[in-house]
Image (cartoon, rainbow, N blue to C red):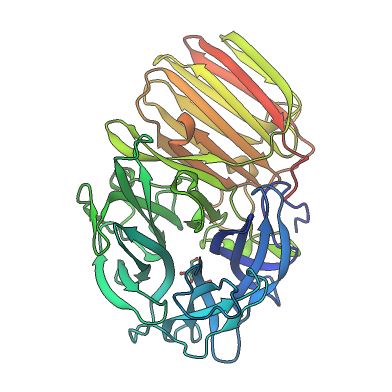
Amino acid sequence: VRTDRPLIHYTPDRNWMNDPNGLVYHNGRYHLFYQYNPEAPEHAHMSWGHASSSDLVGWEEHPLAISFDEHEEVYSGSVVVDSTNSSGFGVDGATPLVAIYTSARGFHGLQTQALAVSLDDGMTWTKYDGNPVLDRGSMEFRDPKVFRYEHGDSAYWVMVAVEAFERQVLFYRSDDLKEWTYLSSYGPAGATGGVWECPDLFPLALDGDPDDIRWVLVISLYPGAIAGGSGSQYVVGSFDGTTFTPDSLLAVVDHGDPTALGQIDWVDAGHDCYAGVTFNGLPDAERTFIAWMSNWDYARNLPTSPWRGAMTLPRRLSLVTADGIPQLRAEPVTAAGAVVADISDVTLTNSLRLAGVAPAARVTLDATVPSASELTMRLRHDSSGEGGVVLRYSGATRRLELDRSAVAADIHGSFASIESIVLPDEGDRLELSILLDVGSVEVFADGGLRSLTDLVFESFDRGGLLLETTGEPVTIQRICIIDLTGGHA
Ligand code: FRU
């Protein structure tokens, strides 16, 4: 059993947590609700837990927000700030926060969409007595993400939800959050090897150009993701208020063919970044994403106590052109930290060893790796240079591999894994930002155009970093280690 807690990632004080829910920025605070069992470290009695933050770095846990009861479990969903009181839930001038969640009747029961209301800025919630507000008679209809769609003079609420088994995203609209009209659907398309869950849809300015707005549809699925088990694909396209149209049509990939899965765009190509969604209530230029840092393959077996489940670092999203197409870029939000090593202009012909990788740290690397070179980085290895998390990069193929087999937990066949991603074509440049914490590693490559997030379970008295190269020399423009241990979650 591991009792050493992540230092810069949100974990609840105790018990089970999965998906982030109801991410909303309101009155100067970021609210993080989440799938939570108030009674035990197992997936049961699903309810919404609650934490909030003023800066996305330090989190304060609050009392249970929305509880399961004898009729329902409270599955994933979203929160909107109903500033025009379109729902009529506001009384005495209070702005209602409205949660739209999936009411689940038992594990194999009906799934409908339901509302809960807060009139005290998200601290306490009352379920709407007119629930459910949307019922398709389906047992797989869930995870509503609602946002305000504004276009010209018109403004209404749009709901994005899934028919999980049919691999479809459904779009609905409403004026008052209570009555919903079907608009359209998307899918099956792209990765369909598992049920679709937790969709999100949001606009981003391509390359920062306010006249070129693209819409990004994020779809989580389990199993069938690129690293195995849970993961999230995304599709770039347009949304006219009724229909989502992808920029290019995707073939259906319904099995684990790595080549076909590699053609799909993934929010993260690691094992442990699932059910991620973005905040309501922020300007589009500050689109911010948080995911559950786990995988349904082994989430129930994670050896931590007395909590089970952590969130990824919050990530600011943007959309940039790379390899000729719009791609998501994610930049992790952390405290500033203290620089503990900063080395520039080294020609690496063999190896370089650095000490001082703190339990929570950011390692950044800027290097030139010729096509005849391979670079290996071993993080938090032991005194003989063994163990730890290993990153391998080939200049010839631009493939970056994350290997956690030396720090695997003995909990599931797929945990001792290696996953990889091909970096966009930026010649021989390699740029990495690696976020280490107790129990996890998040690797962002090429400014966040690719990321790999993995849980790792290792011994934290180890603190070395070893860089090794074979082939032609590698030029290290800069390598920097920043201690983030002070930035508590
Ligand atoms: C995704 C998910 C959602 C569901 C929730 C239940 O991880 O399966 O589809 O709403 O978890 O906890």
Question: What residue is drawn where x is 44% and y is 86%?
Answer: 132
Left or right, 341 with reference to 34: right
Q: Residue at x 44, y 48 (%)?
A: 284
Instruction: Give left or right: position of 211 versus 405.
Output: left
For the point 70% across and 29% down, the residue is 482
Residue closer to the observer: 340 or 2: 340
Q: Residue at x 72, y 28 (%)?
A: 464
Q: Is residue 365 something that shows in the picture?
A: yes
- Left or right of 55? Residue 266 is left
158, 141: nearer the viewer = 158
Residue 352, given in percent of the width and then of the height, sits at 65, 16
Image location of residue 461, percent across then percent down: 80, 38
- The part of the image, by quadrant, that contains residue 119 is bottom right
Q: Is residue 117 above or below residue 260?
A: below
Q: Is residue 220 above or below residue 116?
A: above
Q: Quadrant of the N terminus?
A: bottom right
Q: Position of residue 418 (x, y in %)?
A: 50, 41
Query: Along the line of sight, which residue is nearer the eye, 241 or 368?
Result: 241
Image location of residue 23, percent across then percent down: 55, 61
Residue 271 seen in this snapshot? no
